[in-house]
Image (spheres, rainbow, N blue to C red):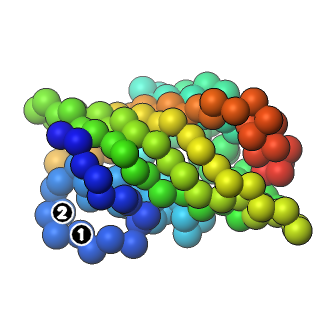
Amino acid sequence: MNTERIITGNEPIKDKDSPTRALIAFYKAFNQGDLDLMADNWLQDDAAVMSNPMGGIKRGWNEISQVYERIFNGPAQVYVEFYEYSFQQTGDMFCAVGRECGFLRAADKEIALAIRTSRIYTKQNGQWKQSHHHGSMDDPKLLADYQTAVV
């Protein structure tokens, strides 16, 4: 399913069991810098994997949470929205693939972000939990500026 809808984390949640709800919860946690909400979104075992511009490959929530702590508690404000995405779902698993745009603000500098991203969720105890995330930036200068500003 392709969609034109943008997800920011501020959308009303109509169907509490939908994949969209899980994505809204992720972007709410990220954009509010809420580590507890983020922990609730992720699978809490070693099967969880994240590969993103800030942390390389991290396995398990303990490693993944350190990346979010660094972003949330660092000197920069980071905000992203999910757009141009599609869903593929089968049984107790779904994958969302799309783009993120947003900004990073640090001191007197603002960087426009452009990230390709995919997220895989699995159902655990009736709730969607993120088990995999991959994010990448096409522009090497943007990547270097982002990594420098967030550290």
Q: Is residue 17 left or right of residue 57?
A: left
Residue 27 against residue 60 in the figure, above or below: below
Residue 60 against residue 33 in the figure, above or below: above
Distance from Cα at disc 1 to Cα at disc 2: 6 Å
Q: Would residue 73 be seen by someone viewing this image from the given angle?
A: no
Reading the image, the residue beneath label 1 is 13
Horizontal and vertical percent position of residue 135: 54, 34
Q: Is residue 116 left or right of residue 132?
A: right
Question: Looking at numbered disc 2 in the image, what kind of residue is underneath it?
Answer: Lys
Q: Would residue 52 be seen by someone viewing this image from the given angle?
A: yes
Horizontal and vertical percent position of residue 121: 31, 38
Question: What residue sits 68% from the left and 54% below the top?
Answer: 112
Reading the image, the residue beneath label 2 is 16
The answer to whether the residues at label 1 and label 2 have Cβ atoms under 8 Å apart is yes
Name the residue furthest left.
91
Q: Secondary structure at mark 1?
A: loop
Screen quadrant of the N terminus: top left
Mark 2 Cα-neighbour bin, 10 Å: few <14, some 14–19, many ≥20 = few
Horizontal and vertical percent position of residue 5: 30, 58
Question: What residue sits 59% from the left and 57% below the top?
Answer: 102
Q: Nearer the viewer, residue 3 or 122?
A: 3
Question: What residue sits 42% from the left and 26% below the top?
Answer: 47
Mark 1 Cα-neighbour bin, 10 Å: few <14, some 14–19, many ≥20 = some
Name the residue furthest right.
108
Question: Looking at numbered disc 1 in the image, what kind of residue is underneath it?
Answer: Ile
Question: What residue sits 55% from the left and 64% below the top?
Answer: 31
